[in-house]
Amino acid sequence: MANLTLDDTDLQILQCLLDNSLRSHKEIGQLVHLSGQAVGARVRKLHDLGVIDGYTLRWNPGKIGQSVLAFVTVFMKSNTAHTGFLAFARSRPEIIEVHRVSGEGCYWMRVRLSSGTALNALLDEVLAYGNYKLSLSIEMVK
């Protein structure tokens, strides 16, 4: 893709949305000295250019019982296990992210579950595709 040309106002709008994606175009306009309609047009442009790829929210998973966060490095048993593993990983909502990695292991997964028992059950299923190394998150610092 060609280099994108964004001006300072586009970058300010982007930062406003990064700070709080629920801000109205009117509120952002007051911060960047544009009308809400002009901000809306720029936000649509940022979408069309692929700069804005979607929206997300920050949440407190512990409040709904999702208190176990783990990082799992998966070592595949064979070259033929990848397709099945990827289908498995995509089908499981507790698997938040999966990355194909270089170095140690084949895949890195970030998983969030309600208990050690639920984590153990998930890891038992991973064993169908390969071995794993587990690291538990003690505290999120950033």
Image: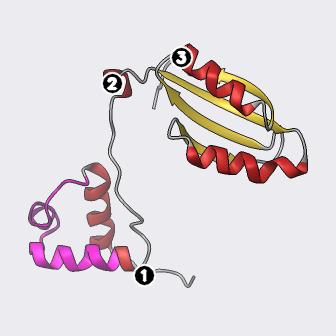
Q: Is residue 136 visible to the viewer in this orientation of the structure?
A: no
The amino acid at mark 1 is: Thr
Q: Is residue 40 magenta?
A: yes
Quarter of the picture containing the N terminus is: bottom right
Q: Range of the magenta residues? A: 21-46
Indicate whether 108 appears above or below 140: below
* Image quadrant assignment for residue 130: top right
Query: Which element is circle 1 on?
Result: loop
Q: Is residue 70 visible?
A: yes
What residue sits right under mark 3 in the picture?
138
Q: Viewed as shown, does residue 68 lie left or right of 9? A: right
Q: Type of residue at label 2?
A: Ile
Which one is earlier in the sequence, the residue at label 2 or at label 3? 2
x and y, in percent, of residue 101 in the image:
75, 47
The kind of residue on which mark 3 rests is Ile
- For label 3, the crowd category at 10 Å Cα-Cα, with few meaning under 14, some 14 to 19 and many 20 or more, is few
The residue labelled by disc 1 is: 5
In the rendered view, tell whether residue 112 sits above or below residue 39.
Answer: above
**Residue topped by disc 2:** 64
Q: Position of residue 39 (x, y in %)?
A: 18, 73
